[in-house]
């Protein structure tokens, strides 16, 4: 004989109710058998349930595939130091837009036409460059799925991206000197941010590597940087300017002897978000006094351009496998100077 239904039929699926002496409580069960309370008001509980359900990717969906890639592929690389935490943060932010567009679709249902419309009819009309980055991320996710045997073809391959205007901002030596002078006059967080930029320029390294730069990487010969994104290990030898910048950064006030070159007042390394706030504060001061805005990433462009002007291979400093890769992205010489053929 069938038992009586425990909860009223007016409740939607997966919404449960517990009646107490004074109040009625509503709750649901999330994937992984996690219990989640939804409060005491029925209407509010229904809304919360719909919100939770919309954020939970269904099994076999693109949303679930993206989550699997972040958890099983990217997170381990970040933990091993092969990818920066900032990379993971950026991919998680990009996944929000991708899930909103494709999250509930089955993995095999995505076609090149869907991707093209995302780039040129929907997301790309509002933020064309971000749309490019998001589809590049989705392409990596599908490549990973193909390697897992989940799909045969990558629907993102061969789809035309939005046209991008190459960035050509080049920080001059005069600007760099004035920027460092302003930072030192502004004090603490501004000085730390500017020194990080200076060290990034001198070593040709990205923000993530500089924020994690520790004393253990230093030797009498120079500073050793590990492999990143399949590149090579690089030993950047000492110069008087690099040694001075490192010493000044290490000497910034700290409660303990810092292990990291760029550190907070407690001696700990900066998080990506924490450093970003300090950088933006300094940049606002720089613009307020008449300076032209630039990004932290422009440090690598300046390093690459200056090294090429010296007649050296920029990839030896940056660690890229191919010289063509680093020159294509970071070479910002406005005028190329060359001797005649003869």
Image (tube, rainbow, N blue to C red):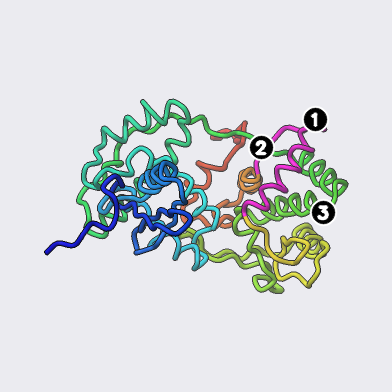
Give the image location of residue 284, x and y in percent.
Answer: 75, 37
Examine the rendered structure and indicate whether residue 201 appears above or below residue 162. Answer: below
Which span is picked out in magenta?
Answer: 272-295
Whether residue 97 appears in magenta in the rendering, the answer is no
Query: Relative to residue 98, is residue 206 drawn left or right?
Result: right
Query: Relative to residue 287, is residue 140 drawn left or right?
Result: left
Q: Nearer the viewer, mark 3 or mark 2?
A: 3
Secondary structure under tag 1 reads loop
* Residue behind mark 3: 188
Give the image location of residue 302, x and y in percent.
Answer: 65, 44
Q: Residues within 10 Å of mark 2 (few under 14, many from 20)?
A: many
Residue 290 marker:
1
Secondary structure under tag 2 reads loop
Query: Residue 162: in sight, yes or no?
Result: yes
Quarter placement of the N terminus: bottom left
Q: Main secondary structure of the magenta part?
A: helix
**Which of 147/4 is in front?**
4
Q: Residues within 10 Å of mark 1 (few under 14, many from 20)?
A: few
**Which of 51/118 is in front?**
51
């Amino acid at each position: 004989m069938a038992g009586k239904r425990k909860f009223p039929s007016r409740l939607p699926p997966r919404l449960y109710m517990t009646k107490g002496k004074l109040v009625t409580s509503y709750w649901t069960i999330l994937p992984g058998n996690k219990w989640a309370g939804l409060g005491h008001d029925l209407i509010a509980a229904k809304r919360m349930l719909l919100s939770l359900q919309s954020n939970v990717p269904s099994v076999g969906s693109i949303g679930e595939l993206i989550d699997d890639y972040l958890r099983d592929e990217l997170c381990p690389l970040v933990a091993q130091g092969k990818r920066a935490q900032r990379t993971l943060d950026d991919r998680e932010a990009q996944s929000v837009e991708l899930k909103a567009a494709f999250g509930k679709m089955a993995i095999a249902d995505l076609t090149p036409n869907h991707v093209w419309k995302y780039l040129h009819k929907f997301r790309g009309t509002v933020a064309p460059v971000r749309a490019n980055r998001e589809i590049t991320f989705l392409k990596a996710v599908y490549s990973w799925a193909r390697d897992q045997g989940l799909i045969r073809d990558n629907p993102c391959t061969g789809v035309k991206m939005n046209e991008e205007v190459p960035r050509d901002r080049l920080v001059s030596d005069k600007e760099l000197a004035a920027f460092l002078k302003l930072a030192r006059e502004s004090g603490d967080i501004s000085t730390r941010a500017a020194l990080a930029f200076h060290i990034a320029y001198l070593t040709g390294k990205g923000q993530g590597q500089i924020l994690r730069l520790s004393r253990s990487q230093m030797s009498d010969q120079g500073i050793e940087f590990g492999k990143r994104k399949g590149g090579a290990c690089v030993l950047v030898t000492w110069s008087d300017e690099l040694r001075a910048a490192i010493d000044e950064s290490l000497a910034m006030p700290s409660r303990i002897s810092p292990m990291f070159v760029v550190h907070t007042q407690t001696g700990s390394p900066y998080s990506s978000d924490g450093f970003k706030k300090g950088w933006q504060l300094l940049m606002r001061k720089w613009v307020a006094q008449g300076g032209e805005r630039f990004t932290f990433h422009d440090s690598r462009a300046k390093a690459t351009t200056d090294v090429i002007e010296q007649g050296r291979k920029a990839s030896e400093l940056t660690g890229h496998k191919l010289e063509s890769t680093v020159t294509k992205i970071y070479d910002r010489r406005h005028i190329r100077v060359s001797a005649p053929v003869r």
